[in-house]
Image (cartoon, grey):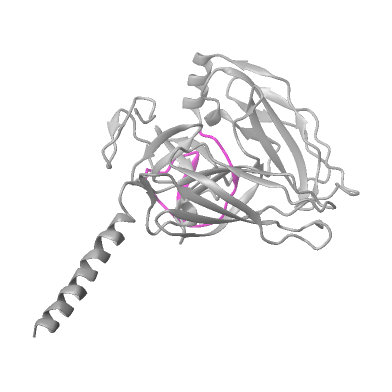
Amino acid sequence: MHILKRTVTFVLAGIFLAVPMTAMAATGTKISSVSLKVSSDIEAGSSDSDVTVTTSSSKYGVEDTEVTNEPDDEWDDGDKPKVKVTLEAEDGYYFASGFAKSSVSLSGSDATVTSVSRSSSKLVVYITLDALAGDDGDYDLDVDGLEWDETDGAASWDDSEDAVKYEVRLYRGSSAVTSALTTYNTSYDFSGYITTSGYYTFKVRGVYNSSNKGSWEESDSWYVSSGEALEISSGSSASGTSGSSGTSSGPDSTSGEGAWLQDDVGWWYCNADRSYTVNNWQYINNNWYYFNGTGYMVTGWVDWNSNWYYCGSDGAMLSDAATPDGYYVGSDGIWIQ
């Protein structure tokens, strides 16, 4: 009888010891979204596989970056390099359960998050870079006539003979404000990105297909004062890459400039020119929303330019308010530490 009691005691002790260890794995501050910058030097015709992934977050760091489909000899036109990125949570933080690829936002080199896997302390993000492009072959993809409309922040250029679409980037000084954005028009509304004073330029290149892209051309510099930036950014919404169809209505009422759409991944905003924003903010119906690398609206914490912002369950950025997890953001939406 005494032997049986000791056996039961040891079994129960093992159970109780196991429970705290499991609970400890999910203690601390939850990480519900991550932001990564991808820098790739991979080119068609080269054997180098140099890809760097970084983050400015203090909650997690990049432990390892690995290109998983390196060629035997060299990269060919149309190849899509695949990258495995391992992130490790810092002490006092853990990756939330149910972490989805839509919770990862990318900037820098053009890439898409294909899948994620997690434990409480590690997150593995699988990224596919855009197809490698060779030279522009026999296609005339030259772009000329780059101009600013200084009244509303719209950029325009002359039509390229063989371009099917165009890629554009916005810069303030030497810093990129946006990643490469796609449009099928010969103009682009940057007003939603012009939020602070500075010297703005934009670059554009013609695109025939993923393997045939022209050279980047740069506009003249345009100085915008703080007052002008406020007037421009609050007067219109920004545009992004070409979108797809979905179910209409959404977290905020639709606008004459576009509409909220939903598919099986989440909500996104289709602008009037059938474009959408990626890896950036967009001002819609008096609210700021953040859209990730695949164009879907983000909820929860957003790490942007070394500052943390919080977007509510409807996607709208909070300002001068307490967040659901007990932190406070100021009138500019930045977390007050």
Image: 306 above or below 5:
above
Q: Which of 151 and 105 is in front in this view?
A: 105
Image: 184 above or below 175:
below
Q: Which residue reaches farthest right?
A: 138
Whether residue 252 is in magenta: the answer is yes
Quadrant, the N terminus:
bottom left
**Residue 148 quadrant:** top right
Q: Give the range drawn in magenta.
A: 237-260
Q: Which residue reaches farthest left?
A: 1
Whether residue 334 is in magenta: the answer is no
At a point 81% along the width and 38% down the height, the residue shown is 215
Which SS type dominates the magenta stretch?
loop
Left or right relative to 248: residue 17: left
Answer yes or no: is residue 292 visible.
no
**x, y percentage for residue 108?**
63, 40
At a point 60% along the width and 35% down the height, the residue shown is 178
